[in-house]
Image: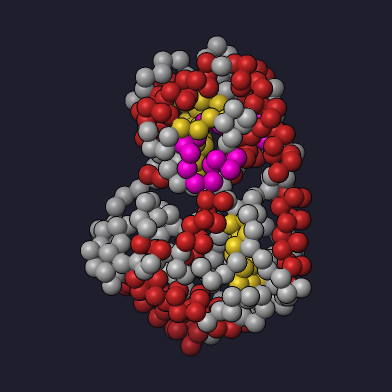
């Protein structure tokens, strides 16, 4: 592993060390300030609650190759602020697998398009920048990406998407249409995320035993894409449920007596207990790749209620592992939650099925084997795309 920032003492992970000689530091600062100036003009116009907006350039340019370990294949993951696309593809000489975790690789800067389809042709007048200029920052980034990808042999770059939804989006983009795409879902540690006795967990967490518990988990609930406001509205007409939420920042609910916020949990085992305490896990995201929270809940035997959006239906299968609501509809979400909470027998049946699906399709070993098979195919001269 080769990373920008290392958090731990694993000897197999190598951290990039920026050069401290004067001339390199001057060039790095000049590049950083140039990128910042390009973004500064939009600081006051960007709407609140959106995802990050990311440049294709970084202050390091091609310097990351100076310390990059020798490899037969390079697998890119989250590269924001580290890998400069043009410099990378100018210098890379081995096959590249790029695992996408959102849409940023093929847009003019956004990580989720929130309904804007301009990335399929060429970005510009970007709604996430609140811009009406066709040659704005999003167009500039898109054009640089186009130039970088145009120099790449289609057999040298292979795209991996964790969800069918993201794979479809990648294939529909002008930037990545020439490259093969494979779907490889995430894998999960099913020892850490496993069912715990619900009654015992509720007692330990001081949760009521006589009320249905709905769980919401998000790294940042205030982002519009996560849909917490829709969940809040859906719960307003349901009298009994207690909402349990996990994540940074406390999302607001009109009736605080119906909401307990646990904050950010750093322990997977504690989070596993929280999933087990809930009757259902709800994910009201309007867009999402293949959210780990859904897999974590299913691994703990807790059925899921979510919108039929992004990669959620890859995992949430109606009458099998959960229930799907119409995207963006408060009424549909409310009715779906009411149905889920009122059918104890269905939840009990789905609980075991959730665990079975994860153990069959989403364990770490399965994910690792799929990547190994892909690497072998590429090195053997075959890189056929598949779902």
Q: Work out whether residue 144 or residue 25 is closer to the camera in this orientation and state it.
A: 144
Q: Which corner quadrant holds the N terminus?
A: bottom right
Q: Is residue 265 above or below residue 323?
A: below
Residue 382: x and y, percent? 71, 70
Q: Is residue 301 magenta?
A: yes
Q: Is residue 258 above or below residue 150?
A: above
Q: Is residue 376 magenta?
A: no
Q: Quadrant of residue 292?
A: top right
Residue visible at 57% across and 69% down in the picture: 179
Residue visible at 31% across and 50% down in the picture: 48
Colour scheme employed for the rendering of this structure? secondary structure
Q: Which residues are magenta?
A: 299-315
Q: Quadrant of residue 125?
A: bottom left
Q: Work out whether residue 22 or residue 271 is closer to the camera in this orientation and state it.
A: 271
Residue 340: x and y, percent? 53, 22
Residue 304 at least partly seen: yes
> Extreme top residue here?
210
> Extreme bottom residue here?
23
Residue visible at 49% across and 79% down in the picture: 150
Residue 213: x and y, percent? 53, 22
């Amino acid at each position: 592993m080769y990373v920008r920032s290392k958090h731990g003492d694993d000897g197999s992970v190598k951290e990039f060390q920026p050069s401290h000689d004067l001339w390199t530091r001057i060039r790095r600062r000049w590049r950083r300030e140039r990128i910042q100036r390009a973004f500064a003009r939009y600081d006051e116009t960007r709407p609140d609650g959106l995802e990050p907006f990311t440049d294709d350039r970084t202050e390091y340019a091609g310097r990351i190759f100076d310390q990059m370990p020798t490899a037969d294949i390079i697998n890119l993951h989250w590269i924001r602020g580290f890998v400069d696309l043009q410099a990378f593809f100018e210098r890379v000489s081995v096959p590249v697998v790029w695992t996408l975790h959102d849409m940023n690789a093929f847009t003019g800067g956004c990580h989720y398009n929130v309904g804007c389809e301009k990335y399929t042709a060429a970005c510009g007048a970007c709604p996430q920048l609140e811009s009406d200029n066709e040659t704005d920052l999003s167009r500039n980034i898109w054009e640089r990406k186009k130039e970088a990808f145009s120099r790449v042999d289609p057999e040298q770059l292979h795209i991996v998407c964790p969800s069918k939804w993201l794979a479809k989006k990648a294939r529909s983009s002008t930037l990545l249409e020439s490259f093969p795409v494979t779907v490889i879902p995430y894998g999960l540690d099913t020892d850490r995320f496993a069912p715990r006795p619900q009654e015992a967990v509720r007692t330990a967490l001081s949760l009521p035993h006589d009320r249905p518990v709905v769980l919401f988990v998000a790294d940042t609930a205030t982002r519009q894409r996560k849909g917490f406001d829709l969940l809040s509205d859906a719960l307003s007409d349901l009298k009994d449920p207690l909402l349990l939420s996990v994540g940074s920042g406390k999302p607001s609910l009109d009736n605080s007596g119906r909401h307990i916020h646990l904050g950010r949990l750093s322990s997977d085992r504690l989070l596993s207990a929280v999933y087990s305490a809930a009757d259902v896990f709800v994910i009201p995201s309007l867009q999402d790749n293949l959210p780990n929270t859904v897999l974590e809940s299913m691994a703990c035997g807790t059925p899921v209620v979510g919108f039929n959006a992004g990669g959620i239906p890859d995992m949430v299968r109606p009458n099998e592992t959960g229930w799907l609501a119409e995207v963006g509809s408060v009424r549909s979400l409310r009715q779906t939650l009411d149905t889920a909470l009122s059918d104890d027998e269905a939840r009990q049946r789905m609980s075991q099925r959730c665990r079975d699906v994860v153990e069959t399709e989403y364990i770490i070993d399965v994910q690792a084997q799929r990547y190994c098979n892909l690497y072998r195919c590429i090195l053997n001269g075959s890189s056929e795309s598949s779902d």
